[in-house]
């Protein structure tokens, strides 16, 4: 059973007593401000216009340092991925083309985009979240209606979008889930990426917003959304596509799960120690589920979940919190199984049937071969599956 201890010794503050500067989740440039400042102090490499760090130190900030870098302090990795993928992304952002990160859900595309923006321009918050309801106004600008009625349309009454703000300040603009937007909305980016300015036809004078040096766009797209709203050929030419692959190396995946889970739990002021054997159960179960899904030919025989690393993190966080609040102060294998089933069941009865079949085959087989934590894991999973039937 894992051990969890709270780092908070005082009673939780009331809302009135909370510090006004306390926020739930700090953006990367705030969380790692001291590290970025230190890297800037030692940076002697060539830098593109307006970049805070040279491309080499951007890579070190994202992927961590190695002995060959010969730094006076260790920089821990924040994104666990292929070095070549990150380097190509950095080079793209130094060019005139936008960067489009494509991958399955949970591969860390948004986190990589945030880290790159934080290291390059010190501001990762200029974000447009793509949805079916995203309009061209979200990409370019809108108007303060009250000010327009009072004094007419002017630069003062204009509300710039996060992308336009990034243009004006020479920052990295981020566009999440680009393919979720309609084609007309997507194409609003074409002139921004090619001409590097936005025209404001409602104004007679001062009606062009030009991008400053350092501006570029980092977009993300879900590989499973292809065909929802495909990018036009014109827009594709203005992006460099980089695939963010699913992590298949167990050691790397283990590091990611522990790193992100500890970060998430730190928001609740918890320190977590997960026994390696219990973490191995989680990783092996997901590996077996992926193998089972790959062997199925019919889509209705596969779980709707993407079985991503992000979902493993969610399962572990849920199990740890359940153990802290309702258990013995730790997490055991039965809690882990219940959290896993609760996370992965999205269709009833389809997903319940798929998991029930998997549990009685693969998990039972692991229990008989290895015992230990697998025994309680098997029991906890069967209990919740029987409840869901």
Image (cartoon, grey):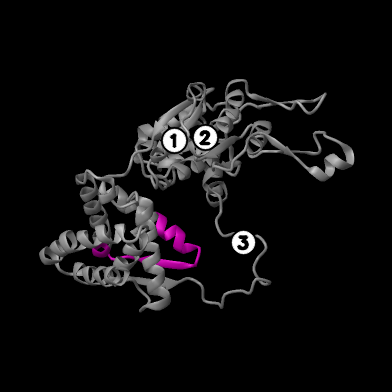
Q: Is residue 123 magenta?
A: no
| Residue drawn at the location 60% of the way across and 29% of the way down | 188
Q: Label 1 crowding class (10 Å Cα cut-off): few <14, some 14-19, many 20+?
A: many
The answer to which image quadrant residue 357 occupies is bottom left
Q: Are marks 1 and 2 in contact (CB under 8 Å)?
A: yes
Residue underneath mark 3: 22
Q: Earlier in the sequence, mark 2 or mark 3?
A: 3
Q: CA distance from mark 1 to mark 3?
A: 31 Å
Q: Label 2 crowding class (10 Å Cα cut-off): few <14, some 14-19, many 20+?
A: many
Is there any visible trace of residue 292 in the rendered image?
yes
Number of the front mark, 1 or 3: 1
Q: Earlier in the sequence, mark 1 or mark 3?
A: 3
Q: Is residue 168 left or right of residue 382?
A: right
Residue underneath mark 2: 218
Task: Relative to 141, say whether 29 is above or below.
Answer: below
Q: Position of residue 33 (x, y in %)?
A: 56, 48
Secondary structure category for the residue under label 2: strand
Q: Give whichever of 21, 244 is nearer the camera.
A: 244
Q: Position of residue 380 (x, y in %)?
A: 26, 71
Q: Is residue 168 left or right of residue 77?
A: right
Span highlighted in magenta in the image = 260-278
| Residue drawn at the location 52% of the way across and 34% of the way down | 218
Task: Relative to 32, say whether 47 is above or below.
Answer: above
Q: CA distance from mark 2 to mark 3?
A: 28 Å
Secondary structure category for the residue under label 3: loop
Residue underneath mark 1: 101
Q: Are marks 2 and 3 in contact (CB under 8 Å)?
A: no
Secondary structure category for the residue under label 1: strand
Task: Relative to 87, say whether 303 is above or below.
Answer: below
Q: Earlier in the sequence, mark 1 or mark 2?
A: 1
């Amino acid at each position: 059973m894992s051990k969890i201890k709270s780092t908070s010794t005082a009673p939780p503050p009331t809302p009135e007593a909370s510090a006004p500067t306390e926020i739930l989740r700090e953006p990367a440039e705030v969380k790692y401000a001291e590290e970025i400042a230190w890297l800037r102090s030692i940076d002697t490499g060539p830098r593109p216009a307006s970049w805070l760090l040279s491309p080499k130190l951007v890579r070190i900030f994202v992927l961590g340092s190695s002995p060959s870098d010969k730094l006076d302090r260790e920089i821990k990795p924040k994104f666990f991925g292929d070095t070549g993928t990150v380097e190509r992304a950095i080079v793209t952002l130094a060019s005139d083309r936008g960067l489009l990160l494509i991958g399955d859900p949970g591969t860390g595309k948004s986190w990589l985009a945030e880290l790159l923006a934080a290291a390059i321009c010190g501001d990762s918050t200029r974000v447009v979240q793509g949805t079916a309801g995203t309009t061209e106004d979200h990409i370019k600008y809108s108007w303060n209606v009250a000010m327009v009625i009072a004094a007419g349309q002017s630069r003062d009454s204009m509300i710039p979008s996060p992308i336009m703000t990034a243009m004006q300040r020479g920052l990295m603009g981020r566009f999440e889930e680009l393919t979720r937007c309609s084609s007309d909305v997507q194409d609003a980016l074409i002139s921004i990426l090619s001409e590097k300015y936005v025209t404001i036809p409602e104004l007679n004078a001062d009606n062009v917003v030009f991008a400053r040096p350092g501006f570029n766009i980092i977009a993300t797209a879900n590989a499973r959304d292809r065909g929802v709203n495909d990018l036009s050929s014109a827009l594709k030419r203005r992006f460099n596509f980089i695939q963010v692959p699913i992590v298949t190396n167990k050691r790397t995946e283990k590091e990611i799960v522990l790193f992100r889970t500890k970060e998430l739990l730190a928001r609740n002021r918890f320190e977590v120690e997960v026994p390696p054997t219990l973490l191995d159960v989680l990783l092996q179960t997901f590996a077996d589920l992926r193998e089972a899904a790959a062997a199925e030919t019919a889509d209705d025989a596969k779980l709707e979940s993407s079985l991503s690393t992000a979902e493993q993190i969610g399962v572990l966080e849920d199990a740890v919190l359940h153990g802290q609040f309702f258990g013995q102060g730790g997490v055991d294998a039965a809690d882990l199984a219940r959290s896993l089933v609760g996370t992965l069941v999205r269709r009833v009865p389809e997903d319940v049937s798929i998991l029930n079949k998997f549990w009685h085959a693969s998990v039972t087989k692991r229990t008989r071969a290895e015992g230990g934590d697998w025994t309680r894991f098997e029991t906890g999973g069967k209990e919740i599956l029987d409840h869901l039937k």
